[in-house]
Amino acid sequence: MYNHTKIEKKWQKIWDKTNAFKTTDKNDKKFYVLDMFPYPSASGLHVGHPEGYTATDIIARYKRLNGFDVLHPIGWDAFGLPAEQYALNTGNHPADFTQKNINSFKKQLKSLGMSFDWDKEIDTTDPKFYKWTQWIFKKLYENNLAEIKEIDVNWCEGLGTVLANEEVITDENGNKVSERGNFPVIKKPMRQWVLKITEYAEKLLEGLERVDFPESLKSLQENWIGKSEGYTLKFQLENSNKYIEIFTTRIDTIFGASFLVIAPEHEIINSIEKNKELVEFLEYSKTISERDRVSGLKDKVGVYTGINAVHPITKKIIPIWTSNYVLNSYGTGAVMAVPSEDERDLEFAKKYNLEIINIIQRQDNKNILINSDAFSFLELDKAKQKIVEFLRYKNIARKTISYKLRDWIFSRQRYWGEPFPVYFDENDNVYLEENIVELPYMENIKPSKTGESPLANNSNWLHFEKNGKKYRRETNTMPQWAGSSWYFLAYILKNADGTYIDIDSKEAYKRFEKWLPVDLYIGGQEHAVGHLIYSRFWHKFLYDIKILPIDEPFVKVVNQGMILGTDGQKMSKSKGNVINPDDIVNELGADTLRVYEMFMGPLTDTKEWNTDTIKGIRKWLDRVEVIISKFAENKTLIKVEEKNNEFTSLWQLTIKEVTDAIEKLKFNIAISKLMVFVNGLYKLNFIFSLEPLKDFLIMLSLFAPHISEELLEKIDEKQIKDHTWPQFNENLIINNLLKIPVQVNGKIRAIIDKEENDSEETLFAKALEEKNVVKYIENKVIKKKIYVKDKIIIINI
Ligand code: ANZ
């Protein structure tokens, strides 16, 4: 067993000293390969981190060897709830211990041999960084995309803050809780900063057509944006000249509308007389989450409001109910209920004994409208057209597009975040700060139960006077999503001396032109509707105000699969199945961990940890070390081209297949091809030439960089980085096809080539095309066709 600790430390030192992975700017070929930057939590890296990081590292190294300028940076998502929660729980100050955590994360990443350009390291809590987070916010404000608003927010008392919709989940009991910590979340009106992401709904949807994201991610985003095309219809209130508007995607069902349902928060509720039952219901509905209301997790309950509407065509009087299954924030917050066609309405109608009108008859695969006045007996599509025409003519219907996407609640009542670059005068007018607003150091950072940010207790900071006028600062802070919405641009702005160039400078634009978009972005799927929507929104906005040259930030996103414990369960402390990457690095080495995590299975699959396999990987690396070291000692050279065609072929084929697998991010396949090559080496009794070995080590270096450098040093003067990616010569590859004899009535009549992926059908087809087979079976009936796998095809006539 080679001494991995010694070898790995040695090379990490050399890489550090020589700044080996510095971002170059040599030519037009560039590759920006990005990892989702980690929260520097106190628990350190888990085995899921090296999975994604090794994958991007492989690509970064591969692209460098192929002559690309490569940007492969890392940084710290260091503001936000997780850091602050931990600080509160352990009595630390987030500023102090965040730095400590960053240091240990960094040490861990270096111990894994990741080829990051450390000059590009960023930290969202660094004022040099968040100066620009604040700058972007100010631009959003100036462009009317940020506003302060009294709105219903998700209030989480346990965390002492409001949360974005994306941060709220539903637990097993159907209750609304915070994603972090599982604390109860209720609806509560509060004054909050809101970013109008809804104005970008259409752009966010359209852009999805131009990017290479996993289909599941795309549809998560599409559903989150939730575009619906339909109509807004006016229903007049009984004995009144007021209208109530409903949104429907099924205007053709209007004759089936037997009642209306409005959201409990609908404005009309304020203006009506309420009986006890209604008041109680309105109180109750505050406790249920919007998502549960849509998902149908909670029972549909409701009450009659006491008022009625007039059906716009039949003029029938229909009751108006209010129920939790109608959302105030979607469409118009009111629906026409068509129990015969809509399941939610049907459930409700049955429960409360409301009228059900059948309006569609299924006849010979056709849908015919019935009970629909003049439109009866028309086919549905036709009827729809006519109804639309009629209602538009009458000025009752108007075409409407609705989105499920809500504006982004952007303030948090917490300490550990970017302060807002704004202040207020005594009349609550908003002013923008010209300079950065730094987060003041405070000892007591406990959130309050009332929704005041801890910064409100810092009166020295809070109040100031200018020209004799009194002002007060914003005490809320930005959510963690703020920094991560643009950090991938910050890497581009960061200079080696730790400074940043101005985001709106000419030089910045030039750099953006060089490096954008991100060519490959690897990270977990959990960011599908949070970070990956927010960052696309900010990017598009920055494009619109001409800071960026292109409008989509990420060409390709890949979600790595989860790594489960050896018991097939999600790793968790309570289950005791957590594998600590540090332990693996100590015991078996970083190279082993890297190769193993890439060998476990396809990058995007969920995979179980297997202790035997990882030991097997280590054994394999030991074999590689033995072969090459022995060779280096003996130097028994031959010219493979002359002496061993078969080996030359294997060597060339390996380059071809490994290259192909890497291009397709099939790293497990690439490793298995390298293994086949090593088997080939063994058969040669340590007599081989230098070139195949060098090529092999260059290829292996993507996966196991330390041992590869160490072994290359024994047979070559140059380091890996001074080589280029090996090229192959197709002509040297011997097609190692299996020969399958074809027997007709007991006699071999032909021999066909079986390629690796040929199916049984393909082989029969090939056999039946052989001239000499055709000769014997022409115009005859085939009685029997048998294929004995990889051996023979038998045909009897
Ligand atoms: C009558 C109808 C008949 C409807 C029918 C559907 C089927 P999507 O596709 O999700 O946009 N709706 C409208 N606003 C709503 C709100 N604020 N809360 C809950 N439901 C609401 O769904 C649009 C349909 O959802 C609309 O079309 C409306 O019900 C309901 F056979 O109108 B429909």
Image: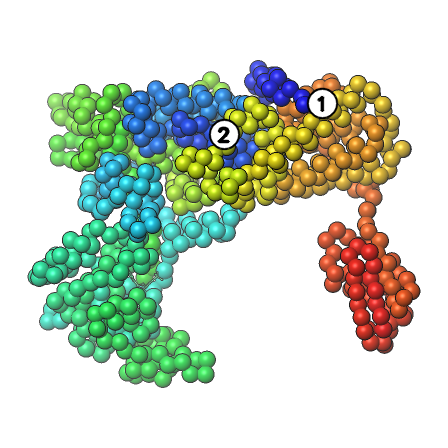
The kind of residue on which mark 1 rests is Leu
- Among the 4 quarters of the image, the one containing residue 476: top left
Count numbered badges in the picture: 2
Q: Which residue is mark 1?
A: 712
- Dot 2 falls on a residue whose secondary structure is loop
Q: Could you tell me if residue 117 is visible in this image?
A: no
Q: Are marks 2 and 1 in contact (CB under 8 Å)?
A: no
10 Å neighbourhood of mark 2: few (<14), some, or many (≥20)?
few
Q: For this view, does 432 lie left or right of residue 787?
A: left
Q: Which residue is mark 2?
A: 580
Front residue of 526/231: it is: 526
- Dot 1 falls on a residue whose secondary structure is helix
Quadrant location of the N terminus in the rendered image: top right
Quadrant location of the C terminus in the rendered image: bottom right
Considering only order in the chain, which callout, 1 or 2, is on the residue closer to the N terminus?
2
Front residue of 788/566: it is: 566
10 Å neighbourhood of mark 1: few (<14), some, or many (≥20)?
many
Q: Could you tell me if residue 415 is visible in this image?
A: yes
